Image: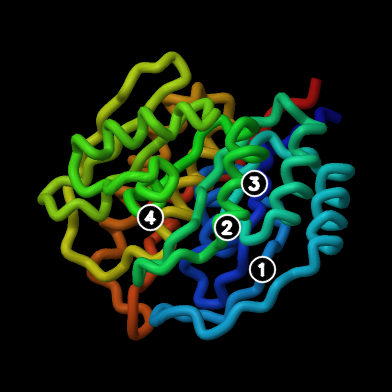
């Protein structure tokens, strides 16, 4: 009898009981992309489509145990990291990933709430830059997060180009800077590649409130395509197209009273099976 394996993707992220963001969005995205999802929970926010009501922390020792358990049994083909809110958590995640230097990592540096408020302290940002940026194959900041990392206002396409170049100098391998907050008819993003080239992407914007979890979805989609052995540029390109389609197919749906979710299953793929060698 022949045996097979699935391309596996590990999501290290927080909880979203409303199903639109965090680990729940990652599970949907990874599954819809034809990969097998595993998870490590870093925090338990109480939230719905209207916002976050409270957050319960997961002890760092428990996060470490989760990481050890998954890596011992189902080593991932790629890893997606979401919000990491303490220096101690950064250290635990970085230490585990450094044991597996060949596994590609996508890091969504969640730092700013939709309201504009910073979600993590400066000490945590410093530890993220020092310990996680060098390990990540690509980071995916939005304009607000890029402004913090580059220490400059990011309000235009020119600002985005300059900020991306500055962020690369922090030790990142590559940066996908998302321009969804631009007041324009097109959504523009820039991918600052490992070879110092810059790739520009443009997508049509849709009139919709259903954008909750788009950043989580993008980073886990990129990780899924990396797990399928696509190149980094291919994974970034395919990941953005997936999110664009997921937004389009959810634009006229009403879920909850606030910012609704994407349609992650607009075109679900069957689980991919690779023959074991």
**Of label 1 and label 4, which has the lower sequence position?**
1
Q: Secondary structure at mark 1?
A: strand
Q: Residue at x 26, y 29 (%)?
A: 200
Q: Nearer the viewer, mark 2 or mark 3?
A: 3
* For residue 174, above or below residue 22: above
Q: Nearer the viewer, mark 3 or mark 4?
A: 3
Determine which residue is flagged by label 1. Answer: 43
Of residues 166 and 100, the one nearer the viewer is 166
Badge number at residue 266 = 4
User: Is there CB contact under 8 Å for labels 2 and 1?
Assistant: yes
Determine which residue is flagged by label 2. Answer: 83
User: Is there CB contact under 8 Å for labels 4 and 2?
Assistant: no
Q: Position of residue 46 (x, y in %)?
A: 57, 81
Q: Using the numbered discs, state the Cα–Cα distance from disc 4 to disc 2 in whole angstroms.
A: 26 Å
Q: Secondary structure at mark 3?
A: helix
**Of label 3 and label 4, which has the lower sequence position?**
3
Quadrant of the rendering where the C terminus is positioned: top right
């Amino acid at each position: 009898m022949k045996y097979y394996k699935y391309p596996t993707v590990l999501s290290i992220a927080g909880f979203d009981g409303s199903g639109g963001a965090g680990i729940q969005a990652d599970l949907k995205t990874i599954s819809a992309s034809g990969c097998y999802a595993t998870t490590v929970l870093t925090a338990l926010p109480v939230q719905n489509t209207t916002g976050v009501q409270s957050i319960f922390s997961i002890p760092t020792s428990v996060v470490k145990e989760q990481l050890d358990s998954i890596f011992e049994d189902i080593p991932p083909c790629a890893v997606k990291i979401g919000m990491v809110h303490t220096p101690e958590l950064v250290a635990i995640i970085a230490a585990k990933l450094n044991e597996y230097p060949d596994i590609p990592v996508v890091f969504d540096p969640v730092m700013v709430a939709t309201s504009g408020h910073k979600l993590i302290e400066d000490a945590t940002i410093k530890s993220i830059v020092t310990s996680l940026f060098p390990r990540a194959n690509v980071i995916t900041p939005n304009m607000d997060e890029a402004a913090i990392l580059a220490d400059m206002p990011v309000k235009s396409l020119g600002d985005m180009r300059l900020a991306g170049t500055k962020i690369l100098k922090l030790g990142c391998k590559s940066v996908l800077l998302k321009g969804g907050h631009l007041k324009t008819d097109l959504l523009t993003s820039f991918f600052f590649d490992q070879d110092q080239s810059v790739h520009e992407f443009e997508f049509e914007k849709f009139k919709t409130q259903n954008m909750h979890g788009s950043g989580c979805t993008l980073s886990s989609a990129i990780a899924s395509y990396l797990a399928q052995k696509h190149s980094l540029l291919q994974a970034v390109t395919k990941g953005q197209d997936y999110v664009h389609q997921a937004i389009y197919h959810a634009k006229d749906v009403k879920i909850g009273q606030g910012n609704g979710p994407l349609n992650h299953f607009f075109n679900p793929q069957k689980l991919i099976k690779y023959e074991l060698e």
